[in-house]
């Protein structure tokens, strides 16, 4: 995987594209790309693990990561509720 392909995968994922859509975009720009869908899934999984490991180091335990994530979810949805 080239650095350009890696960057395009990250960008596509950030924009909400599926791995198959990302792969199609990469192959449109480079028909000779050797990437397969599993390469994209593996990269996205490793990025997610890195993100969780960073949170784990900051918050102390996996349960704290979950509590933090749920807290953010409820804070963001609290403004959307109707009373």
Image (cartoon, rainbow, N blue to C red):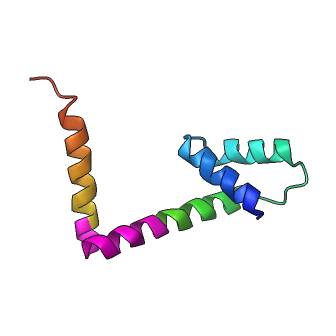
Quadrant of the snapshot with the C terminus: top left
As drawn, the residue found furthest toward the top would be 82
Q: Position of residue 4 (x, y in %)?
A: 75, 56
Name the residue rendered at 62%, 64% in the picture: 42
Point out the stretch of residues depicted in magenta: 49-64
Q: Position of residue 5 (x, y in %)?
A: 74, 56
Above or below residue 40? Residue 60 is below
Above or below residue 69? Residue 53 is below
Above or below residue 80? Residue 31 is below
- Residue 55: which quarter of the image? bottom left
Name the residue rendered at 44%, 65% in the picture: 51
Name the residue rendered at 69%, 59% in the picture: 6
As drawn, the residue found furthest toward the left would be 83
- Residue 7: which quarter of the image? bottom right
Above or below residue 48? Residue 17 is above
Name the residue rendered at 17%, 28% in the picture: 81
Q: Is residue 36 visible?
A: no
Q: Is residue 16 visible?
A: yes
Q: Is residue 79 left or right of residue 13?
A: left
Q: Is residue 78 left or right of residue 7?
A: left
């Amino acid at each position: 995987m080239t650095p350009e392909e890696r960057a395009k995968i990250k960008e596509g994922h950030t924009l909400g594209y599926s791995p198959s859509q990302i792969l199609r975009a990469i192959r449109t720009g480079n028909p000779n790309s050797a990437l397969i869908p599993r390469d994209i899934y593996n990269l996205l999984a490793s990025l997610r693990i890195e993100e969780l490991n960073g949170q784990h180091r900051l918050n102390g335990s996996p349960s704290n990561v979950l509590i933090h994530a749920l807290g953010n979810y409820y804070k963001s949805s609290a403004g959307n509720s109707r009373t």
